[in-house]
Image (cartoon, rainbow, N blue to C red):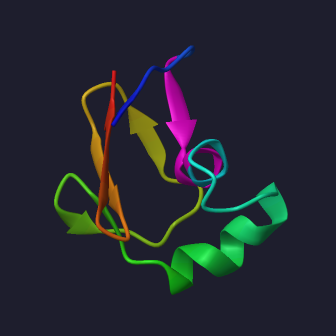
Amino acid sequence: MEIKLNKEFITLGQLLKVTDFISSGGEAKRMVNMLDISVNGEHENRRGRKLFSGDVVVIEGKKFELI
């Protein structure tokens, strides 16, 4: 699934909310440690990780391409 960025970057926590893996930003801290998340093929657990156009994020087996 493609996610269009409206600004230079989005954080991993914001992406989790946009993709409905969490319902509020407060859940991000806990959920990044519970979910299987990779960014560009590398495991990731930092909710503040900046994601840019061209990054590929896989959350629980679902692939998201940032454009």
Looking at the rendering, in which quadrant would you find the N terminus? top left
- Residue ID at (56%, 16%): 7
Q: Nearer the viewer, residue 40 or 65?
A: 65
Is 55 above or below relative to 16? Answer: above
Q: How far from the left and from the top, in percent, is residue 66?
A: 35, 30
Residue farthest along the top direction in this orientation: 6
Looking at the rendering, in which quadrant would you find the C terminus? top left
Q: How far from the left and from the top, in percent, is residue 48?
A: 59, 54
- Residue ID at (60%, 61%): 21
Which stretch did the figure color magenta? 8-15
Q: Quadrant of residue 22?
A: bottom right
Q: How far from the left and from the top, in percent, is residue 46?
A: 51, 66
In this image, 19 relative to 26: left or right? left
Is 67 above or below relative to 62? Answer: above
Residue farthest along the bottom direction in this orientation: 34
In this image, 64 relative to 46: left or right? left
Q: Quadrant of residue 23?
A: bottom right
